[in-house]
Amino acid sequence: PFAVALIYVSYAYTGWNATGYVAGEIRAPRRTIPRALAVGTLLVTACYVLLTYTFLRTVPLAARAGVVE
């Protein structure tokens, strides 16, 4: 299970790592890259929170009782 969990960590790291490769192709990297990383992080966080909220509102509390995953 730990090794499988590291796959998702690898995907996350690859996204942050790729930022360095595109920095040379952007006109104003000191301004654009931090803004893009912040907006991207906020969008992913909003999607995650919205999806979690949807799951919690859709499944009744009795069906979730005692379920770990």
Image (spheres, rainbow, N blue to C red):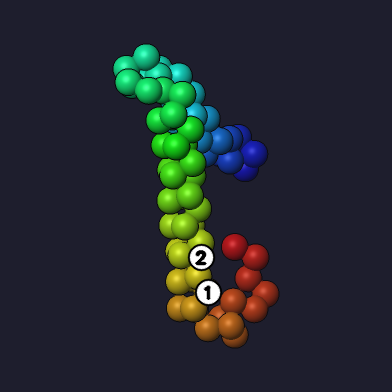
| Marks 2,1: beta carbons within 8 A | yes
Which residue is depicted at the point 58% across and 83% down?
A: 61
**Could one spot residue 7 in this view of the protein?**
no
- Residue 69, can we see it? yes
Query: Which amino acid type is marked by label 2?
Result: Thr
Image quadrant in which you'd find residue 2: top right
- Identify which residue, 61 or 42, lies in the foreground: 42
The label shown at residue 23 is none
| Amino acid marked by disc 1 | Leu
Q: In the picture shown, does residue 2 fall above or below 21?
A: below
Label 2: how many Cα within 10 Å (few below 14, some 14–19, many 20+): few
Left or right, 64 with respect to 19, comes to: right
Q: At 37% across and 23% down in the image, what residue appears?
A: 28
The quadrant of the image that shows the N terminus is: top right
- Which residue is disc 1 drawn over? 56
CA gap, disc 2 and disc 1: 6 Å
Query: Measured from the top left, where is residue 51 in percent x and y?
Result: 45, 64
Kind of element beneath mark 1: helix
Q: Position of residue 67 (x, y in %)?
A: 63, 71
Q: Nearer the viewer, residue 39 or 16?
A: 39
Q: Residue furthest top?
A: 24
Asked which quadrant contains residue 68, the reply is: bottom right
Circle on res. 52: 2
- The quadrant of the image that shows the C terminus is bottom right
